[in-house]
Amino acid sequence: MASGKIPRPTEAELAILRVLWSEGPGTLKEIHETASRAKPTGYTTVLKILQIMLEKGLVVRDESSRPHVYRAAQTESRTQRQLVGDLLERAFGGSAMKLVMQALSSRKTPPQELSQIRELIERLERERED
């Protein structure tokens, strides 16, 4: 995909993207083996999902050798930013505060994460002052 927005991945597509992000590019066999450790999935199911992801522009396939090698078309960070941005607009009317408040109140947040959140807020405030 050449520009801007990528399609919103389904849960099954996100599972495959997580494999590609953590393990790097891989063949169908490698992706299937890794994905099946988390949730048993048929080989042909993974193949079909990869074909759909290729059509949607979520993955890129290197056809220069056999077997073909698949890689994520976008970084994990970029995909997450787009998904959060979409959720922010659709569910929270663009309010980052409402999103963060819901995220923090929906489950117990470990102290280390809260500390990292505080540090991020402080850094953002310092950057705005400059």
Image (cartoon, rainbow, N blue to C red):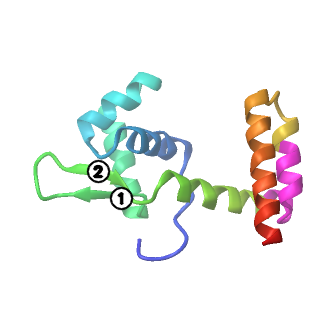
Q: Check disc 1 and report its element: helix, strand or loop.
A: helix
| Residue beneath the point at 12% across and 58% down | 64
Judging by the rendered image, the residue that carries numbered circle 1 is 54
Where residue 60 sits in the image (x, y, percent)? 32, 59
Comes first in the chain, label 2 or label 1? 1
* Residue at the farthest bottom position: 3
Between the C-alphas of marks 2 and 1, the distance is 9 Å
| Residue beneath the point at 10% across and 48% down | 66
| Crowding near the residue tagged with mark 1, few <14, some 14–19, many ≥20 C-alpha atoms within 10 Å | some
Q: How many marks?
A: 2
Q: Quadrant of residue 116?
A: top right
**Label 1 is placed on what type of residue?**
Leu
Tags 2 and 1 touching, CB below 8 Å: yes
Q: Check disc 2 and report its element: helix, strand or loop.
A: strand
Where residue 24 sits in the image (x, y, percent)? 34, 44
Q: Is residue 2 above or below residue 18?
A: below
Is 97 one of the magenta-colored residues?
yes
**Is the stretch drawn in magenta largely helix, strand or loop?**
helix
Q: For residue 70, which numbered disc appears in the image?
A: 2
Closer to the camera in the image, 107 or 27: 107
* Residue at the farthest left position: 65
Is 7 one of the magenta-colored residues?
no
| Crowding near the residue tagged with mark 2, few <14, some 14–19, many ≥20 C-alpha atoms within 10 Å | many
Where residue 37 sits in the image (x, y, percent)? 40, 22
Question: Quadrant where the C terminus lies?
Answer: bottom right
Q: Is residue 15 above or below residue 36?
A: below
Give the magenta part as a residue range: 90-102
Question: Quadrant where the N terminus lies?
Answer: bottom left
* Residue at the farthest front position: 130
**Label 2 is placed on what type of residue?**
Tyr
